[in-house]
Image (spheres, rainbow, N blue to C red):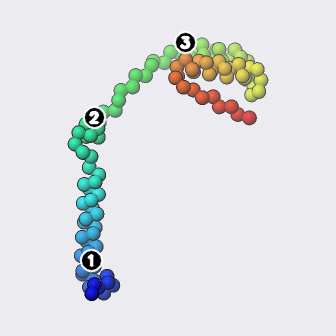
């Protein structure tokens, strides 16, 4: 008849705990390795190079001047809506997707 774990000697239970812990560690260690040739093993540690355009102060000034030409842009006014349309069209020139959010 099989003995329950409560009837087993302490050293036997400790040995089983050790074996179970060791087995779990082996399973985790071998399961986390990636197969050879996978993208994880062939990746370079160097981050991708991103081309950043140079800041043009004259262009920035012209954008600010155009925005200020709308006058006070109090929400709900024609100037506010016209400026929002201007900004959306300008940003749309440099983006393939844009989303405008409306607030009550």
Residue at image mark 3:
58
Q: How far separated are the C-alphas under marks 2 and 3?
A: 39 Å
User: Would residue 27 be visible to someone looking at this image?
Assistant: yes
Q: Quadrant of residue 99?
A: top right
In the image, residue 26 above or below residue 13: above
Which residue is painted at 70% across and 34% down in the image? 103
Q: What residue appears at the point 77 percent right and 23 percent down from the top-left corner?
A: 77
**Which of the two discs, 3 and 1, labels the residue nearer the N terminus?**
1
Q: Where in the figure is residue 67, as x and y percent of width and height? A: 66, 18
Instruction: Judge whether residue 8 can be spotted in this image.
Output: no
Element carrying mark 1: helix
Left or right of 91? Residue 11 is left
Q: Residue at x 67, y 22 (%)?
A: 84
Q: Quadrant of the C terminus?
A: top right
Residue 6 picture location, percent across and down? 33, 84
Disc number for residue 14: 1
| Secondary structure of residue under mark 2 | loop
Mark-to-mark CA distance, 1 and 2: 45 Å
Q: Which quadrant: the N terminus?
A: bottom left
Q: Residues within 10 Å of mark 2 (few under 14, many from 20)?
A: few
Q: Position of residue 49 (x, y in %)?
A: 36, 26
Quarter of the figure with residue 85: top right
* Of the image marks 1 and 2, the number of the one nearer the N terminus: 1
Q: Which residue is mark 2?
A: 44
């Amino acid at each position: 008849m099989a003995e329950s774990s409560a009837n087993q000697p302490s050293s036997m239970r400790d040995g089983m705990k050790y074996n179970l812990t060791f087995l779990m560690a082996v399973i985790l260690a071998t399961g986390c390795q990636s197969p050879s040739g996978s993208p994880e093993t062939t990746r370079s540690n160097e981050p991708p190079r991103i081309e950043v355009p140079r800041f043009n102060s004259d262009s920035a000034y012209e954008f600010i001047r155009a925005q200020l030409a709308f006058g006070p842009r109090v929400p709900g006014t024609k100037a506010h809506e016209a400026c929002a349309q201007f900004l959306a069209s300008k940003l749309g020139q440099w983006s393939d997707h844009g989303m405008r959010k409306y607030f009550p």
